[in-house]
Every structure is written in C-alpha cells, then in structure tokens.
Amino acid sequence: MSTDAVDAVVVGAGFGGLYMVHRLRQLGMTVQGFDAAGGVGGTWYWNRYPGARCDIPSLFYSYTWSAEVQQEWRWSEKYAAQPEILAYAEFVAEKYDLKRAFAFETKVTSAVWDEAARHWTVTTDRGHRVSARFCIMATGCLSMPRAPGIPGEDNFEGRTFHTGTWPHEPVTFEGQKVAVIGTGSSAIQSITEIAKTAHHVYVFQRTPNFSVPARNAPLTEQDYAAFWEQYPAYRQMVLEGTAGIAGGSPFRSLTAEQQRARFEELWNIGGAGYLGALADLLTNPIANDAAANFVREKIRDIVKDPDVAEALLPDDHPIGAKRICVDTGYYEVFNQENVTLVNLRKAPIEAITRAGVRLQAQAQEYPVDAVVYATGFDAMTGALLNIDIRGEGGFSLSEGWRDGPKTYLGLQVAGFPNFFTITGPGSPSVLSNMISSCEQHVEWITDCLAWLDANGVDAIAADPQAQEDWVRNVNEAADQTLFPKANSWYIGANIPGKPRVFMPYVGGHYRQICNTVAADGYRGFRLSGSADRASRRVVRT
Ligand code: NA7
C-alpha cells in the first residue's frame, strides 16, 4: 500500500473541519480531509429527519471569519431548518473550494503516531494510507448515533429509521401508523412534523424532558438591521467569552411576581434563552425549581388530558441540566386525536416484534408501519473512540479514556503529540454556540501550528500534569452547577457502561484561558524536537 504524505489530516467536514482546512491552506500546508458522509455539513448532513432545526438563532449560528459569507448569505428564518444549514455549509465549501481537500464516504479507521518518523499514519476503510505531521479531529460531538439495543429490532417487517441517519430520499408517513421511540430533542422536533400526515403516532416516552417554544418566524429586514446594530457588542462578548452567559438577576433579588414576569417574558420570546431567566438558574436548586415549575404549569395548561399532561411533566432532573428542547407545538400535539403518549414508566418496551412494539407486563402490542428511533448519540467521545487512535508507545486513546475522557483544554491529549480535537471533551463545546467554539479552536490551533514552525518546534503534546489539573478543573466547575444532577448525555449516562464523567467545560473564561496559555509559550504543553519544519513542508503535485 502506498503512503501519501501531507502536512495535516483533518477528520470531519462539518463546521470545524471546513474552517480548519481553510486555515491550514492559508498557512501554506497541504491537507487531506476525510468524512464518512457523502458531502460536507457534519451533523447537518446526517440529521435530515422531519422538523430538524437548530436551537440557536441562525444569525448567531453562522461563521464570523468571512465578511463575504456574512454579507452574501441570508437566513430565511429565526431558527434555520436542516436543509438551509446544510446549504450554508455547502455555500461556504464552494466559495472557498474546500470540498477538494476531502475524500468523502470514507471512514478513518486508525491514526497511529510514528515515534521515529514523528508523524501520524492515518488509514481509512477505502484503503487510504496517509502520513501527516498533524492529525486534527473535527469529528463532532453528536455524530455517533446510538441504536437503543431493544430485543428484536431486526425482526420488524416495516420501515425503520434513526433520526441521526435519516435517508436522503423523501420519506412519507402519510396515512401510516408510526412509533417514535424517545422524547429528546430529535423526537420532539420530528413528532410534530410526522403527526401532520401520519394516521397515528405513538410516542414511546421513558423520561419526560423540558421543552420550550421556539416561536420561530421568518427573518425580516428589521431583524437583520437589529442584528447588525448589536453585532459589534456581540462580537466583543464572543471574544471576551461572555456571549450566551445568563444575564438575568439572581433568584433572591426578585419578588415572586418579578420572577414570574421574567419566566413569562422569556417563555413568550421563545427559545433556549429561557435558561437565562435568572443568573443562578443553573446553580441554585431553588431558582431552578421555580423555573421548572413554571414550565410544568405551562404543560398542564396546554395539554387537555390531565393524565397525559401529568405523564409529560419532567420530574427527574433540574431544568437545563439535560439539554433543554426547543419545539414548535410539541405539547399541543398531544391534543391531536392521532397522537398517543405511551408512558414507558408504566411498562417498558419488551421487544420490537415483526409487527410493532410490545410492552412488558401488559403484554400490549402496538402494531405500526414504521419505527423511528430518536434514541440519541454516543456523545462527545463516541466518534473519536470509534477510531483506533494510538499515540506514544502505541498507547490507545480508548485505553487512556477508559475512566472517562482526559484532555488539556479539550484541545489535546497527553501522549498524543500533534493530535488536536476541535471542540473536544473538556472544552465548552455542546454548552456553547458550536460554530463559535469551532472557530475559536480552529484559530487557536492555527496560531499554535504557526508558532511551532516559527520557533522550530517539532511536536506539541499536553503535559500529563497540566491535563490532570485541567480535568480536575472541569469537574470542579461542573460541581458548582446543577448539571451533574441529571442522567444526561453530557455525563455519558445514556450509554450503558460509559464512564460517568461530566464532559463539557462550564467554568467560564475559557477563551481567555486558552489565549493566556498560548501567550505564555504554550504553558502546560510539552514541546519537543527542533527542526526547520517550514522548509520541510510537504508539497503536493
Ligand atoms: P437524546 O436527547 O439523547 O434523547 C434520546 C431519547 O431516546 C431519550 O428520550 C431517551 O430516553 C430515549 N431512549 C433511548 N433509549 C431508549 C430505549 N431503549 N427505550 C426508550 N427510550 C429510549 O437524543 P436526541 O437525538 O433527541 O438529541 C441529542 C441532541 O441533539 C440534543 O440534545 C440537541 O443538542 C441536538 P431516556 O431519557 O434515556 O430515558
């Protein structure tokens, strides 16, 4: 097998990988990208289920690194739907000729650090073998769909779907009976769409979730004008690392009436901004209860059948400690004749049968034409650990992360030189605006690579002690909040046997910490070797 040589391999053609390729090229590096998908877009390539939509406003879920893209692209709605976000990724990829860097429909199977040669050897399921000085993982946080592992899944004779790997061809549920398994964000978005045409939708709920109305709407000229007016201040907040941080007052500084007015105001505005109702909503259990009770009241108001309403009330986690869902008519859909909530707390699913879904104990069966698994992802670490990644001494990442992921700043792993993770565990990632976080990591990595060359440094890897300190910091930050109180995918609780470690960094000032580390000559990183690397660039013909 011949080995192709480049300066850097980038795994993933989502928003992180696309921008990374662009910046590497600007450094004059040769790049080989890989993606299992047939095109760019990452999570937005795969999640084509009905109703798939971003839960961050489109104007903010946009790249800021290209003034041309900002001027030329126009979002049609406050919260863009999946096809529009995918079109945006394609627009950027075309504009900057980024697709050329990628081999699509190609899964990376291994990445192995060659100690002597000081480079990574990356192999794929299509026979590529590429050597690269840098290996950059832009593999996404929600890119490894999780099959629920219910007995009999293969026996079902109807159509089966997973929201995270939705087919490209049009899917119709017109006149059909459909089972949707799960009530997370993907289910909550898809149920309302599927119920528009299906004969009947059975919603199999194990754990109720909090959802707030999106109040989506077309974007107007005035919306754009208002956005550009506040843009410099927003950009400043992004750079200071304070964008998206709750701006409300603390619970105790408000009277009960004022609290209620605040909840009502944000409920009416719509969106996940509800969690910013109080400054201490995610740290103070009493404040959290008040915000949660307000939503429970809304559910009782909206859902006409009191038994169904009761079953929909989230009761096992603080609001926001699991990712809050943002919906369009979710609770209302249970007032439709053609939607039934199946409460799995009364009787769990025993098996998928040839004809549908059978519950335990009750021996009740729901015959359906289609089953939609909206059962989530092996989040944050799943895609990385699906690749055989080996660093110094052949040590594998899966061995190193057996008790949970360990990184320094969510950017690097001790023992894995010149290996970077964009929005890796231990960085704000899924608890931030993912596009902003991708940009920040890409820019930090770009600066780092330029600095290595400028200083004649061959390789960089996290120092084990700095990594331990950072992991402790990530845990301590989480312990100051209510996040660890939920069995969420943030903590790996949705995957049987996955170590329970809170993965995103919620301590604040993250961007400044990364900048200071760099300004201090990459404090906490081990720098090794010295070579005139810039003149040893891999040139591709
Ligand atoms: P989530 O939020 O992980 O939701 C998965 C849902 O599937 C959740 O309600 C689970 O219930 C349910 N589930 C999983 N396995 C089963 C079985 N075996 N039986 C019944 N129900 C099951 O994934 P999503 O795709 O909705 O959203 C992921 C993120 O994407 C979201 O947070 C946004 O950031 C975008 P459980 O709670 O485990 O009882």
Image (cartoon, rainbow, N blue to C red):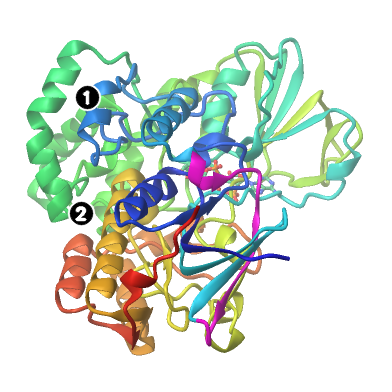
Is 78 in the magenta? no
Q: Which mark is residue 71?
A: 1
Q: Number of marks in the image?
A: 2
- The range drawn in magenta is 100-117
Q: Residue at x 44, y 53 (%)?
A: 317
Q: Whole-percent x and y of residue 60? A: 26, 35
Residue 267 or 493: which is nearer the viewer? 493
Q: Secondary structure at mark 1?
A: helix
Q: Whole-percent x and y of residue 454? A: 22, 73
Q: Which mark is residue 280?
A: 2
Crowd band around label 1 with a 10 angstrom C-alpha radius: few (<14), some (14–19), many (20+): few
Residue 283 or 448: which is nearer the viewer? 448
Q: Could you tell me how far apart the alpha carbons at marks 2 and 1 are, in whole angstroms? A: 37 Å
Q: Residue at x 32, y 70 (%)?
A: 534
Query: What type is the residue that disc 1 sits on?
Result: Gln
Is 102 in the magenta? yes
Query: What type is the residue that disc 2 sits on?
Result: Asp
**Residue 6 appears anywhere in the view:** yes
The reply to whether callout 2 and callout 1 are in contact (CB within 8 Å) is no
